[in-house]
Structures are given as structure tokens and as C-alpha cells.
Amino acid sequence: MEHIRTPKVENVRLVDRVSPKKAALGTLYLTATHVIFVENSPDTRKETWILHSQISTIEKQATTATGCPLLIRCKNFQIIQLIIPQERDCHDVYISLIRLARPVKYEELYCFSFNPMLDKEEREQGWVLINLSEEYKRMGLPNNYWQLSDVNREYRVCDSYPTELYVPKSATAHIIVGSSKFRSRRRFPVLSYYYKDNHASICRSSQPLSGFSARCLEDEQMLQAIRKANPGSDFVYVVDTRPKLNAMANRAAGKGYENEDNYSNIKFQFIGIENIHVMRNSLQKMLEVCELKSPSMSDFLWGLENSGWLRHIKAIMDAGIFIAKAVSEEGASVLVHCSDGWDRTAQVCSVASLLLDPHYRTLKGFMVLIEKDWISFGHKFNHRYGNLDGDPKEISPVIDQFIECVWQLMEQFPCAFEFNERFLIHIQHHIYSCQFGNFLCNSQKERRELKIQERTYSLWAHLWKNRADYLNPLFRADHSQTQGTLHLPTTPCNFMYKFWSGMYNRFEKGMQPRQSVTDYLMAVKEETQQLEEELEALEERLEKIQKVQLNCTKVKCKQSEPSKHSGFSTSDNSIANTPQDYSGNLKSFPSRSPSQGDEDSALILTQDNLKSSDPDLSANSDQESGVEDLSCRSPSGGEHAPSEDSGKDRDSDEAVFLTA
Amino acid sequence: MEFAELIKTPRVDNVVLHRPFYPAVEGTLCLTGHHLILSSRQDNTEELWLLHSNIDAIDKRFVGSLGTIIIKCKDFRIIQLDIPGMEECLNIASSIEALSTLDSITLMYPFFYRPMFEVIEDGWHSFLPEQEFKLYSSATSQWRLSYVNKEFAVCPTYPPIVIVPESIDDETLRKVATFRHGGRFPVLSYYHQKSKRVIMRSGQPLTGTNGRRCKEDEKLINATLRAGSRGYIIDTRSLNVAQQARAKGGGFEQEAHYPQWRRIHKSIERYHILQESLIKLVEACNDQTHNMDRWLSKLEASNWLTHIKEILTAACLVAQCIDREEASVLIHGTEGTDSTLQVTSLAQIILEPRSRTIRGFEALIEREWLQAGHPFQQRCAQSAYCNTKQKWEAPVFLLFLDCVWQILRQFPCSFEFNENFLIMLFEHAYASQFGTFLGNSESERCKLKLQQKTMSLWSWVNQPSKLSKYTNPLFEANNLVIWPSVAPQSLLLWEGI
């Protein structure tokens, strides 16, 4: 690759963020797609892989005696600090990475070179795994009120909408086209979710071009049609997810919001979710807090509050709750819009759908939800997540916020979701990774033009294949809580919303709970299943033997029942067994034993002890043969786990690595 | 019966009970000597039994002839009773007030409580110091049991039996006691089998402004170290506070006089600062305004999580000294009855797998809190809703339990008990039908004859039927030392409370 100035730098040090004194010495490689750091220490040879597309910022810091520090911040919230001995090398790496992290053509992205060794047929099957036509069918469409419209075929009316759209039966093509001319970017009102039980629906659009007084008969008829499509209610909620002030400011630009006087039977409602720029700054502030080195509790809480992040999350949740209530309790249809109807609208519609329909709380349903409300309706993935070099002002963590909302709900309804936290984290990772084609481009139209489906692979198939890793052992499909609409407590307490350290500090393993209940339960569940199968097989065999009526009915079956407490080392014991730097900045901490003046004696001690305790650890993990299958379920086992090893897929990456 | 004098109106009908997250219940309110009972007198409905001793504060309000009493409990519950009739309401309120602030311990419910269960194992004898010592004596001969405090003469807050170095005789102990705050001479708290190092605790040395020394004290402390090895003295006060203590006759060990020891100051707040912190925290939790911003700043202003972090950090430091640096540790603050115990007991949770089992944890509380003389009576007299400023209240034990919860959250499979167990302990420490947490020290408990007159909490908890509620289904014995994270990102507010 022409952009790589230096493919390999030796004697680079990777600084441990928790205890800066520990640094791993190794070699840094630059490839066409990854930055790879391989530790020198022979027994581990630990590798750190970072996709170029994950790199958010690169910062060259002032040269010190030890070398030239390079700080790489990733979009999946990993922070890597490297110390490169030679200034010149550092500069080369810096310049190369700056270019590599900002591709200008889609063809440069990883998904066009990523090859998971699947044949053509498997790839095609992967792309049809999530099928939106099926999803609309599942909702009960088309029916007497709603029909599939072909008005947008070849993207004639709106180029950021999909071709397959559901509109009220009474909305003629004339009305639709007329309405589209009165809406920002021609994003006219269409169906997002249809609630079978009471015919209420969630529709979405962009803001009307009302200015101070403009009207549009067709647009008014369109809303009328939406109301008529729901015989159970005589009004429609119109939810503008912007703060009122922002919406009013838009009027000066000839845009704005619906005037209740012009539209018959609408109830208009503002819900103040801030715009993408506020959100971007808020995340930035929160990440600064996460980055603080040994912050005090007040620093942390103060910073977290100051970032406003959780307040924004709550605003989105509140909007979703409002809509879900309107649909399920009042039986009213809701039209949601913001400015262009592709950011806040997507967040709010998907949160509301998630609350209303248990299907979206399953693995496959969640993929469908993202496919429908985000991918197909033209959420600008490329612009928001900076896949290609573009305007930094377009970048904003819109879907990250949605994913966090889901996590907050999972915390409150631990049995309601079929998937677990890891599923969310991996989706977030791949939205930025560009390893799969799903999240490329800004609209369906662009994706079709690029022939994404023929040239790249689908993430959904990949996740589905490894679904065992993403299952929530506590999920109960038949539980009363998980059926129907999720009802949040009537008095929402503020401490419902928590900081998600599993996401924003997920690469600082020391901060995470060191034992995973989920993995443990999954292992137990799987083992139970195994034993049950074994029991079944043995019973069958016993029956056969009895039938044959052999005299010797004693079957000596090796009952290799692994004892329940022996094998699961679900915790990462090596981490669990390492003390952290508790002294903080306290100078009197005796990390130096008084006799030795050596700075690192405490460190050496620590490592020695770690080694000495290793044997019993390993003995712990492979005592029983039956447990091997289980251990591969543990978080560090799966090769596809991006949070653990930075999204590498070793087999395929190696090929790329060689050609580079 | 003198309770009858305090109860002006024993029974009121048509009282409506409001509790958060529950539907309102209408029923009959009864006052007894120890309980407030509300029963709807219908089948299948729960009755409310509330111990008067659980009541922290009450408020009265009147709208016409309908009176409302808001009862704020020590376990942070808030309940509201709507009582028809002005007079009844006033009577009830004043009775509750009188009954919940009884001075005499012997009038408390544990002295009247008759258990409805069969005592399989008497909790008063479940954790005898002799038995606990046996665990150590098999591993080391460096330590012995001393009966020097048999009559509570040497140290009124110590139990009759303490563990001291083998080579130190009782006479020396008596002399050391005069040099330590409250007579609390250094005793063994924990022996770590792996590194053969110990945790000791004591009161502060009474060096005063002119730097008094005590040869016996130096001898005792040094006796715990082998030649050439070193130890750490962890003072749970900041250096400043420790220096100020000298003016009042207290102080800290001069390193020159204890050459094998290094002193570290780890500041942990005490007394009213903690109490204020708790009051602010509970206030913030009960605030119903739905404003995210204010919530976080209120949480921050309460400093509760800061205290948690301080305590955990100090405990982790001790564990690190013992396990990694292989150095013995002596811990003290001022009296050695509060922050000292938080640190010693948490360090044991981290270091000792046994203390992460139910019985082990009970033994730990018995040994490090009850026997060690944590003044439960004083500390738990009032909780978060109390307006009157009293000097002695502090949620020291609650902070300890919260710290344990934080570790439990980080290592969900390493504890035999669950969150409910910790909450149960918290509730019983503040109001209980059992005598376990009465009194401020062993000597007070002896004087009250608690063993004969009341039931032990452990007798009740350790029934198999009760234990099932407190057992963690994910428990898998983990023989390793567990190192919790003290980063703010890892610390959460304990919602269970």
C-alpha cells in the first residue's frame, strides 16, 4: 500500500493505562487494514489488532527520554498508547495512520478485502437472513388499512428512503408526492411500526416545510389518511423530537413544525432531544472523564454529570416511553419527526418499537429492528460514524445512544431480552469497523449502486452463526414481564440510568466485574443440556439392551460427568489475581521496599507472585474432559469476539497481512 | 406494665397505609409495646409489623380532621398512615414517639421476644474465640490466647479472650494497654496462611505532644516480626489529623522508635461526616424530581461513594502488603473501633476465601465487629432521617456492608451469600428482635446478660430454611485472593438499600 511509510517498527512499548509503569515491549506492524502490536515476551506473544477504521484520533505527544509517545483513540473507546524509540519512525507511523484512518473511497474499506472463506451461496444466504418484507408480514401487513407502495421505486420520490414502503391505503400517489414536496429531503410520512393489537401505528417523516405560514393540502391529507388507518382513535399524535426552540428556529429557514390549526385532529408534542452536535460534545466530555487517570469519586461524578450524557439518554428513553404509551394505552397512532427524520426519529421509533414488541427483544428481532429503522430508512452511517473521510461536524454517536438505551433497559428487565450485553457491544464495534457491508453508505440507494451485497458479507449472518455467544441465559419468553409491552415503573427514579462501564471503559479490564454471571449460567445451562442428552442416549441404549435381553445387562458406561464445581473458570483469573495500583498518587505508599532503592521492586514482586500462583489456575481449568466445550464459550475463547481481541479474524487477516 | 402508660390509643380503625410501590391498604392500626401493626383483617393480605425501634423520625400533618403520620424508618423506608380523627392521630403519634425513643436497653424487644422456631444451634456459641483460634494454632505457634482481659479490667471494649504474640506475657500487655487509646493494645486480627503474615489492630498510641514512648509496646509490636523482616503501620487518619491528636494525648508511632515498621496514612472519614453523607445520600435518593443532572450532583455532594472508595482502597492496600509484599500490618485510627475494623474486615474478605462463605462472614462479623467492640448501640441509634445532631451516630457498619457489596458485584461467583444477606444484616444492626447487635461491647453485653435473656441472630439465620434465601446460587469456592477495582467507574450505588 502506497500510504504505509514504514511497515514495521521494533522495540515499541505499549503502555498499560491502569498502571503506566507496566509497559509491554514489542513490534509494531502496519498493514493495509490493521495496526498490529506483537509483544516480544516469548511465553505470551500477545497480539493487539486495531482496525484502521476504528481509529478516531491520533495524537503525537512531546518526545521524552524514552521515546516518542503516540496516543491512538479508537471509536470503540479503546485507547492505545505507544512509545516509539525513534522520532522519525514515530512520525512515519503517525503520517501513515492519519491517511489510513481516513479512507476517501469505499473500496479502501476493510469489508472489500475481508474474506471469511465463505462461498458465494453462503454469502447470499447471509444477506437474506434479515428480510424486511417478512418483517412487515409479521406485523400483519398489508391489510385493510395499509398497503405496500411502489411510489419510491428507483428512488424517484425520495433518495434516502427504501423502495419498499408502507403507506395508508387511502393515500394516493398524488397525495404522497404532494406531501413529499412539503417535507425536508422529501421524506414523507411512512409506516415504521404497526401494532397489530389495536391498529395503532408509528409513522416517521422529516419536518414539514411550513415556515411561518405555509400549508400543503396533500400533507394534511396524508396525516388524515394515517388517522383513518387507525379506526380505534380519532386523533394522531405528532411528536417533534426536537427542543421547541430549535424547531422554531427552523421556521426562519422555511422549515418548522405542524400547525395544529391546519391539521385536523392532531395532538402536537415537543420532546426535547438535543441535536447531533450537542450529543457529539457530550460524548466527548464523557470520554474525557473516562480517560482521567485515577480520578477521585467527585471528579468522576461531576464530570459525568457535566457531560450531560445520561440526561440525553433519559430524554431519548422518555420519548420512546411516551410513544409506546400512546400506542399501547391510548391506541393512538403517532407520527414522529425531527429535522431530517433520520437521527432522533430513528432512535425514538426504535426505542418505542422495542418497548412495544417482544419480537424486537430477541436476537433476530433486534437485527430486524436495526435493519428497518436505521439501515433501510437512510440513517447516514457513513457520515455519522466517519467511515470515509468527511465533515467532522457530521459525526455523532446517534446509534451508540440507541444501543445504550437498550442496555439501560436490559439492566432493568434482565429477563426480557434474548441477547446479552456482548451482543450490543459487538454490534457497536462493527458499526465502526467496516468489516461487514451492512453499515456502509448513507442510504439504500448508495448501497445498491455500490453492489454491497455482491462484494461484502453481512454482519447479521456472522452474529447469527455465533449466536450462542450472545444469548442471555436469563431470558424467559414465557415470563409475564417479557410478554407484550415493557412497562417501566411509573415513578422513574434518577438512578435508573447508570454509567455503562462495560461499553465506555470496556478495554480497561481491571474495571469490569471479574466474573461474568452470564457466562457462568450459560456454561451451566449448556452442561445441563449435555448431560440430559447423554442421559437420553444412555436410556435409549439401556432400552435396546433390555430388548435384546442380554444376560449381561450391566452397562459400563463411562459416565464422564464433570463435577459441577470443577471446571468453569468463567472469570479471567489472571486478571482477578493481579492487584491494581491502589496507592494512586499517594507518595507514601511503600511500593519500594525500603532496603532496595529500586523503583520497580513492587512490580517484580507482583509478577513473581503471579507466576507462582499460575499452576493452580491452569489446574483449575482443564481437570475434566467434559468441560472443554464449555471453556470455549468463555469470553476469551471465541475468535470472533471483537471486544477481546480487537475484531480480528485471524485466518483471514493473515492473508491480508501477507499481501500488504 | 409500663408500656401501657405510653400507649394512649391502642387501636384505631379505618387507617390507610401508603407505601411507595405498593397499593394503599386500609385496615386497623394497633400499637403494642414494641410493634406498630396494621392489618386489613382480610385474608391473603399482608400485615405490616413495624418495630418501634426501627422508627427513625415521624412527621404529622393535618387536613381537617384527617391526620397523617409519616414514619421514616432506619432501614430508609418511608410509610404514611392516614388516621381519621385528630385526637387519635395525636395520641398515636406521641405514643410512637415515646416508644421509639425508649432509653433503657432492657425494655427493647429482644428481651421480650420469644422465638417461634426451634433452636438447632445456639448462635451465642457458634463463634467462640477458642474455636476461631484453633484455625490459627494449627498453622503457627507464634500466637497464644490471653485471658488478661477476663474481667474487662484491662480494656473495657475488648472481649475477655484475645490473641497475642506467644512471647508476650500478660504483665506486658497490661503495660501496653496503658499506652494505647481505650486500653486497646495490639491484638491479632488475621493470620494469612499463605504468606504467614498478620493483620493486627489497636487503638492509637498515647504519645502526646512530648513523644512518650513505651518499651513494652515496642517489644510487643516487634515480637510479631521475624528478624530482618518489615511491617507496615496503617493509620486510618491523615497525617494532619494524627498530628492534631497529639494535643489530646493521642498520636502515632515515631518511626525512629519502631525501626522495622513503616507508617502509612490512609485517610478515612469518621463520625458525623459519614452520618451527614448518609443523610444527603438518602435525601437525594428520595427526591422525586426527574432531573438527571441534579441527581448526579447530589450523589456527588453526598460523598458517599468517595467514602466507599477510600475504605476499599485502604483495605486493598492492606491486602497487598500482606499477600504481595509479605509484610505484616498493624492498623489503627483513633479508638480502633470504627475505620480500623472496616479495613481489617474488608482485607480479610479480599484475602481469605473462608470469610466469603456465610459462616465465615458471620464469624468475621462476630470477631471483627462485635467482639472487637464496635459500638453498635451508639452508632446505630439513629439513621438517615434524624434531625437532632448527635455525636455518636455513624453508618460505619453500613459502609462496610456496602463495600462488601461492591466486591460482591465485581466477583459475583466468589461469595456464598447474596445481597439479601447483607441487607438483612443492615436491618438487624439497626432494629432487631435479636440481641446480637445490642450493646456497645462484650462487657456491656455480659452485664445485660444477653446470652441468657435474648436470642442470637445467628440462631435464626443459620436455620436451613432461612439460609436458602441468603445463598448465592452462583457460588463456586474461589481460593484465590480477589483484587477488586477501586476505579470510580467500577463503583456503583447500591440500589438494594
Image: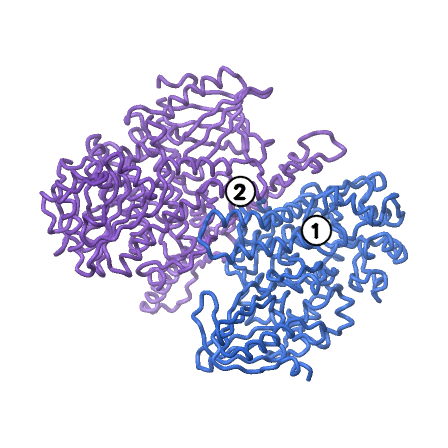
Chain colours: A purple, B blue
- Neighbour tally class for label 1: few under 14, some 14-19, many 20 plus, Cα within 10 Å: some
The tag on residue B366 is none
Subunit under mark 1? B
> Where is residue B438 shown, x and y percent of the image?
70, 68
> Where is residue A184 shown, x and y percent of the image?
22, 37
> Where is residue B310 shown, x and y percent of the image?
64, 46
Q: Amino acid at mark 2?
A: Trp
The C terminus of chain A, quarter of image = top left
Closer to the camera in the image, B96 or A264:
A264
> Where is residue A493 shown, x and y percent of the image?
45, 56
Residue extending furthest top? A88
Q: Which residue is mark 2?
A: A302
Q: Tell me the residue at 53%/52% (across/down).
A: B493
B329 with respect to B94 (left or right): right
Q: Is residue A142 visible?
A: yes
Q: Amino acid at mark 1?
A: Gln
A222 with respect to B419 (left or right): left
SS category of the residue bearing label 1: loop
- Neighbour tally class for label 2: few under 14, some 14-19, many 20 plus, Cα within 10 Å: some
Q: Which residue is mark 1?
A: B193
A27 with respect to B484 (left or right): left
Q: Tell me the residue at 62%/37% (across/down).
A: A607
